[in-house]
Image: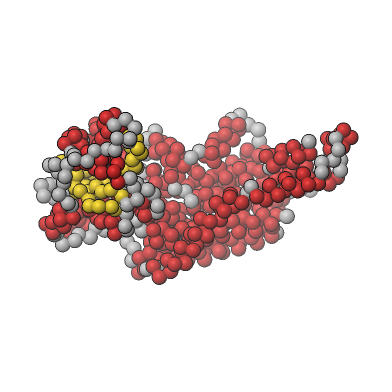
């Protein structure tokens, strides 16, 4: 009856493992709330504009022989950059552009891990700075677009959400991006701007899932699994009829800032050609068409 | 001819190889005798050339298997000082959730899967073929397909989900959804192993016990169960490791929230996605150790069977 003995030993081991695992009251890892920083939006905005160099639009062209360009870009840029890439490939024979879209923080992790890009476009300054600190960025970062947040709800609006205050409703299933994702960081700042500490706590307790990038948030809302999510205006637009966008109260939402830069070790000439186009009138017009706020180049 | 036979054995796998080996040992392979009559015996250096190739070719594969694990442990040794209270808390939270959900999943799988395996092994009934396929499918199904399928079935607007929602039961973003995802992907491993174990039991023993006056329950308890138990346990640990590693279906169907749905694999993914590679490494090592324990248990149980 060796098997019986084995089974009982296995059970005892399992029970012992559980005793260690089952957390004590002092474990101190209650569901993550939202901690609101003392609001100093002016100073961060100032830091961002200081970090961004003045724009020299549309001067750089692509090398005549073309080549292969790899662009790592924030998930929210998916449609706009794909469109820009198609335009560029159509007008520049021999140019081949590959995109890798994802959460800006994931893109930085990938590049740190050795993935070679030529251009990095981030959804916030924090991740661009992280990339620069990791020695990944060549030259200066230019701000090429701004974006705003909205609340999205499924077209059927199961939780009957009409305004930001309804996010604190009983049992509302709210989905945000992870706090390290630019969209998640902005969303938490927005929630902090919507009401007092008690309101923020209730909304934080309504968060049911934290996603890897802003498009995963949109997907959960489009499917109707979540009652609400906080995404960029541009994502809500990309979601089409499947979602309803609800504006944040005036002044509640931070302005998302998108910097772009050439990547260390990449093809600098191609990178500058792409960045120049994005900053130039055509690129800015395409971005505006997808709901981004052009930086006025 | 002989060389061909050997390469055949490699593709057939271990059972085929064992059969051919025993035939060789007995010297009773008719094909080998025929060859010996017409062809000269292949020179011994031809054989050693094959053997040398068999040693060289797998080296890249072995490196591919070993290096990542070595790198993980190596990196883990340097994470030591980064072992902050936050990280340990995140580890324990994810590990506890993984342990609880996978245990509940295993309990459910054993309860439903053992009788099912017995039926599949012992009874021919209408639809048994269909159930066979149904049980096998999740083994070959990519987890992301499982995630989409679960969403379409049990999501809020899914086939069954909309009725559940109307009854006030929502599964999305709950720990129950994690258990469902785990059961979906891991149950087949248990049912397959258990059915195999039931099929291998010598029916004569059971009949003998019945002839000696044991009722069906006593036969089951004293003859069948002890014989199949090692097989059930082996299947269980395999299913357990599969449930522990469940990722795709969970993140798509159950969501990703600490303490509720963020099991170990999701915690690793979230830490990586947050740029916190050190936490990801720490969690990965914990899961590696857990998997090694499971593997050791499988070996141990397997050895006990012989």
**x 40%, y 54%: residue:** A113
Q: Is residue B166 visible?
A: no
Give the answer, above or below, for where B17 lies relative to B302. above
**x 59%, y 56%: residue:** B295
- In the picture as drawn, the residue positioned furthest to the front comes out as A64
Pick the front one: A164 or B206: A164
Which quarter of the rendering shows the C terminus of chain B?
A: bottom right
Pick the front one: B129 or A49: A49
Pick the front one: A129 or B147: A129
| Picture coordinates of residue B23, whole percent (x, y) | 82, 42
Residue A8: quarter of image? bottom right
**x 49%, y 59%: residue:** B71
| Picture coordinates of residue A54, whole percent (x, y) | 15, 49
Q: Is residue A119 left or right of residue A38?
A: right
| Picture coordinates of residue B261, whole percent (x, y) | 38, 51
- In the picture as drawn, the residue positioned furthest to the right comes out as B37
């Amino acid at each position: 009856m060796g098997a019986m003995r084995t089974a009982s030993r296995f059970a005892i081991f399992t029970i012992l493992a559980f005793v260690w695992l089952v957390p004590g009251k002092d474990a101190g890892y209650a569901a993550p709330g939202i901690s609101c920083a003392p609001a100093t939006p002016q100073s961060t905005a100032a830091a961002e504009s200081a970090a961004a160099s003045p724009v020299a639009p549309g001067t750089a062209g692509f090398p005549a022989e073309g080549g292969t360009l790899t662009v790592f870009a924030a998930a929210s840029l998916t449609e706009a950059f794909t469109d820009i890439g198609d335009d560029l490939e159509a007008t520049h024979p021999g140019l081949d552009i590959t995109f890798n879209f994802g959460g800006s923080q994931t893109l930085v992790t990938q590049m740190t891990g050795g993935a070679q890009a030529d251009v990095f476009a981030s959804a916030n300054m924090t991740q661009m700075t992280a990339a620069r600190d990791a020695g990944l960025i060549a030259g200066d970062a230019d701000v090429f677009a701004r974006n705003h947040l909205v609340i999205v709800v499924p077209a059927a609006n199961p939780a009957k959400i009409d305004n930001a205050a309804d996010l604190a409703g009983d049992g509302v299933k709210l989905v945000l991006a992870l706090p390290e994702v630019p969209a998640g960081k902005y969303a938490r700042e927005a929630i902090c701007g919507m009401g007092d500490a008690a309101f923020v706590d209730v909304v934080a307790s309504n968060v049911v899932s934290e996603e890897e990038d802003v498009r995963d948030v949109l997907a959960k809302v489009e499917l109707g699994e979540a009652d609400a999510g906080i995404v960029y205006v541009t994502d809500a637009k990309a979601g089409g009829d499947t979602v309803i966008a609800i504006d944040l109260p005036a002044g509640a939402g931070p302005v998302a800032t998108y910097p772009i830069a050439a990547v260390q070790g990449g093809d600098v000439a191609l990178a500058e050609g792409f960045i120049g186009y994005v900053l130039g009138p055509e690129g800015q017009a395409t971005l505006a068409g997808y709901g981004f706020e052009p930086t006025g180049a | 001819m002989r060389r061909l036979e050997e390469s055949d054995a490699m593709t057939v796998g271990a059972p085929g190889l064992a059969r051919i080996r025993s035939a060789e040992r007995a010297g009773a392979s008719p094909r080998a005798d025929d060859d010996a009559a017409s062809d000269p015996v292949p020179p011994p250096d031809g054989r050693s050339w094959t053997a040398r190739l068999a040693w060289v070719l797998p080296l890249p594969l072995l490196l591919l298997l070993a290096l990542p694990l070595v790198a993980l442990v190596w990196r883990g040794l340097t994470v030591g000082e980064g072992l902050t209270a936050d990280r340990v808390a995140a580890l324990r939270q994810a590990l506890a959730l993984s342990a609880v959900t996978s245990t509940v999943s295993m309990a459910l799988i054993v309860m439903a899967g053992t009788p099912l395996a017995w039926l599949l092994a012992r009874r021919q009934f209408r639809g048994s073929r269909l159930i066979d396929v149904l049980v096998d499918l999740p083994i070959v199904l990519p987890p992301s397909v499982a995630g989409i399928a679960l969403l379409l079935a049990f999501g809020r607007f899914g086939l069954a989900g909309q009725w559940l929602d109307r009854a006030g039961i929502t599964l999305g973003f709950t720990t129950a959804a994690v258990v469902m995802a785990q059961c979906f992907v891991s149950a087949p491993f248990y049912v397959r192993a258990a059915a195999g174990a039931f099929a291998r039991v010598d029916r004569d023993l059971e009949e003998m016990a019945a002839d000696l006056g044991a009722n069906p329950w006593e036969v089951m308890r004293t003859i069948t169960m002890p014989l199949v138990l090692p097989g059930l346990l082996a299947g269980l640990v395999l299913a357990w490791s599969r449930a522990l590693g469940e990722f795709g279906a969970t993140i798509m169907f159950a969501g990703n929230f600490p303490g509720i749905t963020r099991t170990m694999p999701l915690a690793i993914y979230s830490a990586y996605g947050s740029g916190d590679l050190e936490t990801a490494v720490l969690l990965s090592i914990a899961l590696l150790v857990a998997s090694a324990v499971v593997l050791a248990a499988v070996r141990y149980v397997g050895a006990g069977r012989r």
